Image (cartoon, helix red, strand yellow):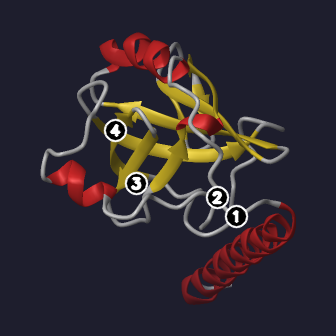
């Protein structure tokens, strides 16, 4: 086998594996879409109010990397519905009404205050493993489903303040999610 033939075989194997990964992720998204609830949408005008400095924020925003959102089954069971499972640079905002992950190049993720279950630090989450307390994780629920959303902040010294403040969010009246 000459170099060209070997290169073509390696390329074919690579393309086959990439295609199988894409096919598996697409099928995971289809399966999850059939069983997962509709995710909450950002309240109208909230991002504009934050950008104008008109929204009440409980803590200064954190910048960093939104790692992913996973189901409570496993820290590696990434949600594949929409773009919620994709990593992105982000700024997280803590408001009395919830937590907003404003992601660059992806849709924002809104977690209403009444959906928050817990906040903690972890060594990692699907898409980002750091060791120690490298990732801030917010556990939240919709209907009977619980999710963990991971965020790797540029300033990790704020994790404990954020975890306490997120856990202390007041429950807000139930609002239909996805409306």
> Label 3, on which residue?
88
Q: In the image shown, does 44 or 139 lie closer to the viewer?
A: 44
Left or right: 167 in relation to 66:
right
> Label 4, on which residue?
93
> Label 1, on which residue?
38
Q: Which mark sits nearer the N-terminus, 1 or 3?
A: 1
Q: Quadrant of the N terminus?
A: bottom right
Residue at image point 56% right, 82% down: 3
**Distance CA(mark 4)–CA(mark 1):** 22 Å
Pointer 3 and pointer 4: residues touching (CB < 8 Å)? no
Displayed quadrant of residue 176: bottom right
Q: Which mark sits nearer the N-terminus, 1 or 2?
A: 1
Left or right: 7 in relation to 21:
left
Residue at image point 76% right, 60% down: 37
**Distance CA(mark 1)–CA(mark 2):** 7 Å
> Label 2, on which residue?
177
Pointer 1 and pointer 2: residues touching (CB < 8 Å)? yes
**Distance CA(mark 1)–CA(mark 3):** 21 Å
SS for callout 1: loop
Q: Which mark sits nearer the N-terminus, 2 or 4?
A: 4
Farthest residue in the front direction? 173
Q: Position of residue 172 (x, y in %)?
A: 56, 36
Tell me if residue 163 comes above or below residue 14 in the rendering: above
Query: Mark 2 or 4, which is nearer the eye?
Result: 2
Pointer 1 and pointer 3: residues touching (CB < 8 Å)? no
Query: Mark 1 or 2, which is nearer the eye?
Result: 2
**Distance CA(mark 2)–CA(mark 4):** 19 Å
Tell me if residue 66 comes above or below residue 46 in the rendering: above
Pointer 4 and pointer 1: residues touching (CB < 8 Å)? no
Count neighbours of disc 4 (C-alpha within 10 A) and say few if under 14, some if 14 to 19, many if 20 or more. many
């Amino acid at each position: 086998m000459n170099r060209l033939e070997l290169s073509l075989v390696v390329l074919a194997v690579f393309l086959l594996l990439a295609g199988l990964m894409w096919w598996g992720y697409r099928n995971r998204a289809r399966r999850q879409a059939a069983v997962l609830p509709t995710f909450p949408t950002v309240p109208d005008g909230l991002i504009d109010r934050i950008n104008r400095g008109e929204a009440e924020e409980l803590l200064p925003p954190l910048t960093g990397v939104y790692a992913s959102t996973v189901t409570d089954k496993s820290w590696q069971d990434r949600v594949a519905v929409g773009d919620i499972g994709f990593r992105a640079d982000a700024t997280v905002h803590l408001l009395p009404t919830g937590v907003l992950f404003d992601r660059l190049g992806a849709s924002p993720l809104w977690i209403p205050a009444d959906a928050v279950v817990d906040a903690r630090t972890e060594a990692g989450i699907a898409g980002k493993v750091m060791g120690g307390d490298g990732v801030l994780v917010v556990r939240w629920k919709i209907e009977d489903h619980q999710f963990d959303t991971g965020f790797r902040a540029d300033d990790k010294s704020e994790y404990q303040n954020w975890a306490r403040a997120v856990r202390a969010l007041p429950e807000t009246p139930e609002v239909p999610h996805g409306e």
